[in-house]
Every structure is written in C-alpha cells, then in structure tokens.
Image (cartoon, grey):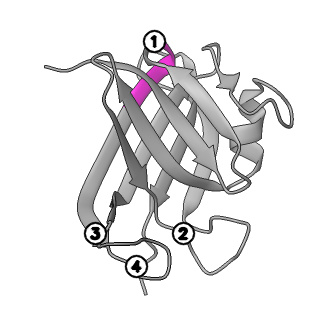
Amino acid sequence: MRKIKNIHVVLENCEVFEIPAKSIDLLVINEIKNQILVNAYQYKNGETMEHQNADYIHLSIFKSGELKNLTEMGNGNDINRLHEHNDITQIELNYEDGESVGYYVPWGESEYINECQKSQFKNNFWKKEVLDITIEKLTP
C-alpha cells in the first residue's frame, strides 16, 4: 500500500493549497480516464502532454486540519476559501515515494466558477467538523 504525503488542490486562478494527509478525512476519485495530447503548435518532435481526468471526486477535510496556501495569495490558509469559491480545477496526490499524480476535475460552462463543485461544512461519522467537497460531471 502506498501512502500520500499531501495533496495539492489547484484553483482556477492558479492558487494551490497543500493539505497534509493527516488533515484529510476522506478522498475518493472515480471514473478516471487517461488523456494523451500531441499538439504540434505547442510541442515539437512528437512530445506529448499526458494527464488524467476524473468524473467524480469527493474530498473531505478536517476543519481543524492544516491547510497551506503555496502561492501566498488570497486568505492564506483559510479553509473558508475552498468553501466560498467553487473553482477547483485539479487534485494532485503527492506520495511519500516522491511520485505525484494529478487529476483534472469536471468543470461546467462558466469561465471562472466550477458549476460541478459543491461544498458544505458538516459533521462526519465521528462527529468531527469537516469541509465536504464533491465535484462530479453534470448530467444532461
């Protein structure tokens, strides 16, 4: 079994929040699809851009947990930033062995607001307060 060191939550404005493993209550990533892009306009000699898309992500963060803004923008380590603005674009898992894997999340029609993202503060099974974030592909 592999262990994660932390996850990075990447926002639409390129802000990045780092959440240590001990601050995560739950993380589920489902319906993962690989994408490989060869774009002759951006990449030369057949270079590829590879990433993964997930149609469903559920992230639950302890409200009392640590949160670090790596870009030093906005409200610093305020968990309310993730709750008040639906603009997550990617979740990156950083493993203890040094490997990182990023997953792009579903996004709606809006340029700046992720219409696929919902969040709420609630109590988990053990009555601990968490920020519960769900991002899932919109159904037609």
Q: Residue at x 41, y 82 (%)?
A: 40
Q: Residue at x 46, y 75 (%)?
A: 138
Q: Looking at this rendering, what residue extends furthest in the left direction?
A: 1
> Which label belongs to residue 36?
3
Q: Looking at this rendering, what residue extends furthest in the front direction?
A: 45
Horizontal side of residue 83 vs 109, given as left or right: right
- At which x and y percent is residue 91? 47, 44
Q: Looking at this rendering, what residue extends furthest in the right direction?
A: 74
Q: Residue at x 32, y 72 (%)?
A: 45
Residue with the mark numbered 1: 22
Camera-side residue: 118 or 3? 3
Q: 10 Å neighbourhood of mark 4: few (<14), some, or many (≥20)?
A: few
- At which x and y percent is residue 123? 55, 25
Q: Amino acid at mark 4?
A: Asn
> Which label belongs to residue 107?
2
- Dot 1 lies on which element? helix
